[in-house]
Image (cartoon, rainbow, N blue to C red):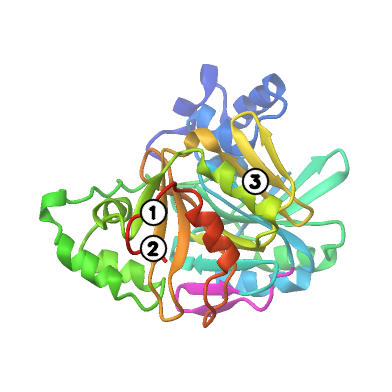
């Protein structure tokens, strides 16, 4: 169960559902994630209060659920973390799985799935001005959203209804049990890291994915590695760099890749960005098939990062929040076996007045 009971978490001793309704009346445009934080519960707990009306609890193998999503046709995939929301429209192309790892590889919807984190699922039918907004929503053990799938006007509602019927759980109680969030890991002191070996291993990388293995080998945190890697591999940038990158990519028509992850999913956009709109604390991409909402004030640290590969160097802009969690990564569009887009490299290198030795 959650470490905080619903009665403790709600205002004025009201049941959770009633507290949420009161909050929605007071703040008309409040999103469920923000409402959950205000009420001191998880999003999954709050969503469960709608079981029997706006929500249906699902059960089963989530891999089998996802294999049915292509039948829904065109949908909107949403993955977010605390500081960034990534929304991409398209069709789920043939989800595939190997143990607890999954892939959806498509020109529009491109996902890396970590199924061991997928613990709770709901089908949601929310009344809105245009009718009913239907979705599938998945959460980790702590009740935090890992991935959501929203039907569009052209989606197959009958296929959605059949999927929901096939995976409906017998338990439709309005209370959802969740686990306490695991404690954050703490980096080892810098003095305990074999910096020379880290840098040597970094210099001999063959693939960008090998970087995760490098971090594990030397038992070093990601930001810690960027700091210790030396200027020939990573250069610190200003926290507002995302706005600059998005605006320059749009102006120069440079195709980019935008990675945003939750605990259970990394969602990727590949292609151009066009309409960049600042709005309060957010910088937004508002294109027909791709929306990004990045809270600029939530970016506490940004780095320009170079990783050698067999196809040449690959350059990324990596963004982190104050907790050390990765907010987003930005790359130039690239397929395996291809060198990095020169237009992107020029854009990325242009973020720094003078690059140290080692940057090509």
- Mark closest to the chain's N terminus, 3 or 2: 3
**CB under 8 Å between discs 3 and 2:** no
| Labelled disc at residue 247 | 3
Q: Quadrant of the C terminus?
A: bottom left
Magenta residues (range):
91-104
Task: Please give the residue where the numbered disc 1 appears in the rendered image.
Answer: 355
Residue 259 visible in the snapshot: no
Whole-angstrom CA distance, mark 1 to mark 2, is 7 Å
Q: Quadrant of the N terminus?
A: top left
Residue 303 as seen in the image, left or right of residue 331: left
Task: Please give the residue where the numbered disc 2 appears in the rendered image.
Answer: 359
Q: Residues within 10 Å of mark 3 (few under 14, many from 20)?
A: some
For residue 147, above or below residue 218: above
Residue 186 as seen in the image, left or right of residue 335: left
Could you say which is closer to the camera, residue 4 or residue 267?
Answer: 267
Residue 60, image x, y percentages: 57, 68
Residue 329, image x, y percentages: 50, 55
Specify the farthest residue to the left: 191
* Image point (40%, 33%), residue name: 4
Could you say which is closer to the camera, residue 325 or residue 121?
Answer: 325
Whole-angstrom CA distance, mark 3 to mark 1, is 21 Å
Q: Residues within 10 Å of mark 2 (few under 14, many from 20)?
A: some
* Image point (46%, 79%), residue name: 311
Q: Residues within 10 Å of mark 1 (few under 14, many from 20)?
A: some
Look at the image and say whether residue 357 sits in the magenta stretch: no
**Which of the two marks, 3 or 1, is nearer to us in this view?**
1
Image quadrant in which you'd find residue 130: top right
Image quadrant in which you'd find residue 322: top left
């Amino acid at each position: 169960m959650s470490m905080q009971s619903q009665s403790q978490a709600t205002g004025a001793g009201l049941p959770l559902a009633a507290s949420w309704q009161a909050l929605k009346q007071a703040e008309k445009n409040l999103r469920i994630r923000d409402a959950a934080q205000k009420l001191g519960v998880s999003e999954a707990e709050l969503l469960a209060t709608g079981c029997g009306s706006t929500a249906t609890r699902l059960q089963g193998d989530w891999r089998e659920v996802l294999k049915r999503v292509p039948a829904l046709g065109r949908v909107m995939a949403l993955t977010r973390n605390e500081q960034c929301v990534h929304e991409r429209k398209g069709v789920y192309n043939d989800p595939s799985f190997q143990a607890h790892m999954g892939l959806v590889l498509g020109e529009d919807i491109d996902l890396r799935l970590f199924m061991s984190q997928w613990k709770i699922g709901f089908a949601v039918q929310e009344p809105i001005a245009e009718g009913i907004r239907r979705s599938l929503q998945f959460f980790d053990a702590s009740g935090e959203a890992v991935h959501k799938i929203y039907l569009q006007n052209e989606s197959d509602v009958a296929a959605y209804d059949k999927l929901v019927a096939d995976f409906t759980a017998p338990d439709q109680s309005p209370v959802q049990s969740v686990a306490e969030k695991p404690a954050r890991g703490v980096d080892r002191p810098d003095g305990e890291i074999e910096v020379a070996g880290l840098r040597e291993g970094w210099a001999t990388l063959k693939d960008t994915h090998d970087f995760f293995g490098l971090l594990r080998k030397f038992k070093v945190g990601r930001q810690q590695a960027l700091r210790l890697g030396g200027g020939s591999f990573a250069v610190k940038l200003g926290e507002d760099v995302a706005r600059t990158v998005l605006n320059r990519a749009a102006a120069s028509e440079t195709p980019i890749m935008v990675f945003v992850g939750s605990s259970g999913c990394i969602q990727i956009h590949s292609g151009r960005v066009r309409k960049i709109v600042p709005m309060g604390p957010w910088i937004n991409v508002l294109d027909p098939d791709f929306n990004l909402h990045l809270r600029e004030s939530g970016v506490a640290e940004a780095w320009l990062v170079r990783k050698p590969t067999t196809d040449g160097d690959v350059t990324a802009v990596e963004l982190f929040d104050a907790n050390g969690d990765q907010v987003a990564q930005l790359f130039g569009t690239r397929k395996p076996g291809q060198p990095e887009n020169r237009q992107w490299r020029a854009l990325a290198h242009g973020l720094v007045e003078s690059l140290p030795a080692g940057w090509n």
